Image (spheres, rainbow, N blue to C red):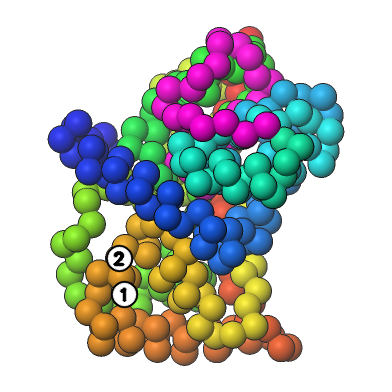
Amino acid sequence: MTFSTKDIEPFIAFEKNGWEKAAGAYHDHWGALSAQSALPMLDLAGIKQGALVLDVATGAGYIAAAARSIGATPIGLDFSGAQVELARKIYPDIEFLEGDAQDLPFDDQTFDSVVMGFGMNHLPEPEKAAQEAWRVLKPGGAFAFSVWAAPAAGEGFGIVLSAIERHGVPNAKLPEAPPYFRFADPIEVKAMLTAAGFGEIATVVASQVWRHSDPDEMFDAFNKGAVRATAMLQSQPENARAKIRDAVRAEVRELMKGEDYLIPVPASLSVGFKQS
């Protein structure tokens, strides 16, 4: 599941350009959902008060903020200048830096923990990020990360992707990319983290619920507030995109409870520990 330089360069540019444009929209549409698994991931990593924590692919800083809330000292890092600017605006008392997850600008054995929220599926060579996490961790430190769980019927990603499959047209405008749900598979997680030197590897699924007041909000989140999913939808002909919206709306309406639509969007959380 690796890519040659020829394969990954268009993907690198696609992701970089995409996140520079999507930082604010992602925060507006996805932020409250993404933040739900922050504390469970920190707990999985055993992060305690006083720990020095590196939050890689920090985005708007949700996990860094969660780490601070339990008394840890976080530093956030993201490759997108727009994301770093947004994080600094939202959390001005946390340090945020621009940098590469696959080439961390820190010395060996600097951090007690390294975390990454929903970033591994956006990296061209995630194995390098795991190796870099191992390098900057102190012995005994944890590397924990979250990804979206594999799509299933009646859940956020399953609803949207099945609608695209049924009503969309073949999509040739996207660059070749790593498998989006690769690290929702515990076998893939264990293979990668073991190769990087980690032990005590575990993967759990965390329940998350996307609460919307309008049945079109979830489609809008995918259509405006992401990178790969947004590109998939935006490259569809207008009539196909309208059919996809209608199909998503119909399924979301089935998830109404009280006055809101409650959409399950579980996350897969993984951790490995640097052996002493």
- Residue type, numbered disc 1: Ile
Q: Position of residue 226 (x, y in %)?
A: 44, 60
Q: Quadrant of the N terminus?
A: top left
Where 44 falls versus 28 (above or below)?
above
Residue at screen point 57% across, 44% down: 85
- Which residue appears at 55% of the width and 16% of the height? 106
Quarter of the image for residue 191 reads: top left
Q: Is residue 129 above or below residue 111?
A: below
Residues at marks 1 and 2 touching, judged by CB atoms closer than 8 Å? yes
In the figure, is residue 21 to the left or right of 164? right
- Residues packed near mark 1 inside 10 Å, few (<14), some (14 to 19) or many (20 plus): many
Residue 112 lies in the magenta-colored region: yes
Is 221 in the magenta? Answer: no
242 left or right of 23? Answer: left
Secondary element type, mark 2: helix
For badge 2, the amino acid type reads Met
Residue where numbered disc 1 is placed? 164
- The answer to which of 73 and 199 lies nearer the viewer is 73
Range of residues picked out in magenta: 95-120
